[in-house]
Image: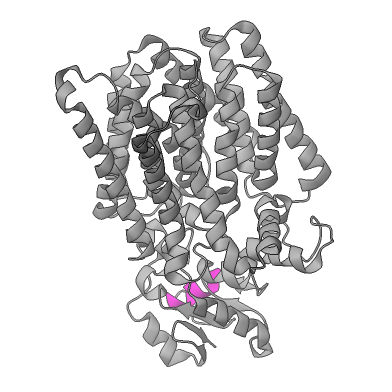
């Protein structure tokens, strides 16, 4: 029987256990904007542009309108929400959304708290799992920015709640409404949600842990989402420029990973054995980390520094605990849900790592979807039967949670404050960056076209519509091509993280700034951004 959070008689300790993860989640996702007074992250600039255009031109059509871009506007959830909030508060989108959207993203932590409590009825498990997730660097750093996924993830998490319960019309209605919100906001999350909604009843029917009638009725949930998705695409989103396209062989490969992942987890769920699989998985993780410090392991992946490898220790600890928690999780409909929730992102992670050219760009985001169920299972392990350490169980579990949370939160500091290249440190923008883009847009002397890295391109092109040629600047600064066709924009962080290409800063020669001084003229300088011609 599922435990309802609202039915619990809450004491002061319980309120504290709920409040702590929420406060941590909100802080880690909002302080980058409060620190720099400018939007954090690169992906938000086209969304700001679309939101401002909605406010400027409404009433108007969205798709196929040159006032908007040809991609993000086909999943306009975050822009519509930002425009509505701007009208209600009177604040400009560029001031409001960098704080409001990360705050919305922090509510995912609350949903995970509710899910964990419903699954286990244990307030410690709920608090520990939500704390562990709230502190995870790959979620807190990314969702501090305004993106479609940042806005869609808490809706995605809430959409999982009906999957935990027996089928009825109320749950079908709730899932349909929530999943449409996901579909309106992010097509990739809608696809992941469809797979999870399909995996849960399918797994339950195969292993016999869901009654036949209930299991079959649950298939109506993914059917409803699939029908909405197809209709939405055919009626509205088909002109969009999709980032990910799949070949037939990749579709077959993805299906294979899904079957393999579900099969292995179902076997472990039913037998409670396979400790050798745990050891094999841990060995694989250690090998991959070791190789990544010396070689490029996946497409577009950087070579990890030993320091970054050390920062992965809290996630290895959570992985070990999660594997233990999965084995001790009671065999029931709830374990079927956990299997479906975990097997899909694991399968997509394997597919992204070994079967797509996008490689590291996809696996980085998949980690968030793996870590959510893993954090719940890790907390289950910490609250589990420690027969030999019963007296010290509570203090030791608390120490482990605090250590993991502190170590994970430190990575946010490393990225946001110390500008670590491999942790997204180049995502920091300053008011001066926005000023330089506005100056460029108003000066025809530059012919409206520039050279600059990805960080520059997202702001100048995505927000102000100025064409930016990323490879040209890198080729000039590294000596590949000494002819600079377009004026080049540089900024202070380029001296720290390098030239941002393929998600990470690429190293520049030590004399790159001298090269600019000796060969080009400085057209614009605000103390941070410089434009050279």
Q: Where is residue 44 in the image (x, y as percent from the top left)?
A: 58, 61
Tell me where residue 288 appears, x and y as whole percent.
32, 40
Start-end of magenta stretch:
470-478
Q: Is residue 303 visible?
A: no
Q: In which quarter of the image is residue 155?
A: top right
Please state if 63 lies on the left or on the right of 200 as rendered. right
**Figure check: 268 above or below 196:** above
Percent of width and height locating residue 197 = 60, 26
- Decide whether residue 471 is among the magenta residues: yes
State the predominant SS element of the stretch in magenta: helix
Q: Residue 499, percent across and down?
A: 44, 69
**Which is more toward the observer, 60 or 104?**
104
Q: In this view, does 81 lie above or below 320?
A: below
Residue shown at 51% from the left, 9% from the top: 207
Residue lying at 58% horizontally and 24% vertically, measured from the top left: 163
The quadrant in which residue 417 appears is bottom left
Q: Which colour scheme is used?
A: one colour
Q: Is residue 368 magenta?
A: no
Residue at 37% from the left image edge and 87% from the top image edge: 514
């Amino acid at each position: 029987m599922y435990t309802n959070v609202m039915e619990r008689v809450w004491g002061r300790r319980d309120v504290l256990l709920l409040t702590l993860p929420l406060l941590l989640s909100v802080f880690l996702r909002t302080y980058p904007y409060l620190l720099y007074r400018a939007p954090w992250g690169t992906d938000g600039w086209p969304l700001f542009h679309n939101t401002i255009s909605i406010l400027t031109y409404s009433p108007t059509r969205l798709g196929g309108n040159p006032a908007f871009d040809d991609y993000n506007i086909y999943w306009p959830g975050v822009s519509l929400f930002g425009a509505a909030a701007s009208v209600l508060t009177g604040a400009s989108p560029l001031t409001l959304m960098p704080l409001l959207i990360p705050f919305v993203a922090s509510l995912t932590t609350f949903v995970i708290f509710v899910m964990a409590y419903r699954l286990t009825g244990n307030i410690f498990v709920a608090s520990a799992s939500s704390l562990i997730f709230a502190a995870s660097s790959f979620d807190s750093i990314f969702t501090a920015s305004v993106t479609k996924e940042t806005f869609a993830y808490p809706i995605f998490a809430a959409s999982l709640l009906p999957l935990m319960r027996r089928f009825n019309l109320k749950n079908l209605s709730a899932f349909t409404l929530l999943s449409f919100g996901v579909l309106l906001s992010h097509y990739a999350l809608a696809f992941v949600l469809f797979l999870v909604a399909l995996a849960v009843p399918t797994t339950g029917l195969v292993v016999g842990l869901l009654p036949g009638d209930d299991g079959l009725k649950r298939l109506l949930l993914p059917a409803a989402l699939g029908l909405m998705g197809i209709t939405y695409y055919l009626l509205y989103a088909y002109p969009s420029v999709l980032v990910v396209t799949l070949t037939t062989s990749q579709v077959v490969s993805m299906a294979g990973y899904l079957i393999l992942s579900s099969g292995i987890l179902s076997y472990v769920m039913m037998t409670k054995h396979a400790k050798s699989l745990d050891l094999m998985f841990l060995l694989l993780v250690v090998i991959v980390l070791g190789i990544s410090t010396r070689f490029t392991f996946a497409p577009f992946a950087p070579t990890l520094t030993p320091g970054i490898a050390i920062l992965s220790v809290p996630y290895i600890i959570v992985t070990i605990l999660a594997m233990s928690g999965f084995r001790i999780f009671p065999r029931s409909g709830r374990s079927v849900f956990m299997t479906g929730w975990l097997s899909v992102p694991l399968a997509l992670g394997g597919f992204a790592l070994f079967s797509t050219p996008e490689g590291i760009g996809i696996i980085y985001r998949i980690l968030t979807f793996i870590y959510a169920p893993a954090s719940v299972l890790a907390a289950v392990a910490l609250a589990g039967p420690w027969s030999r350490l019963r007296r010290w169980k509570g203090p030791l579990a608390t120490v482990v949670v605090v250590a993991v949370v502190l170590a994970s939160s430190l990575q946010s500091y490393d990225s946001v404050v110390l500008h670590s290249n491999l942790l997204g440190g180049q995502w920091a923008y300053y008011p001066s960056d926005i000023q330089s883009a506005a100056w460029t847009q108003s000066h025809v002397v530059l012919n409206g076209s520039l050279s600059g890295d990805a960080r520059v391109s997202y702001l100048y092109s995505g927000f102000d519509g100025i064409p930016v040629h990323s490879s040209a600047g890198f080729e000039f600064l590294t000596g590949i091509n000494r002819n600079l066709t377009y004026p080049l924009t540089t900024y202070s962080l380029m001296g720290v993280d390098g030239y941002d290409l393929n998600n990470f800063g690429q190293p520049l020669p030590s004399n790159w700034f001298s090269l600019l001084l000796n060969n080009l003229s400085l057209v614009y300088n605000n103390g941070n951004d410089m434009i050279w011609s």
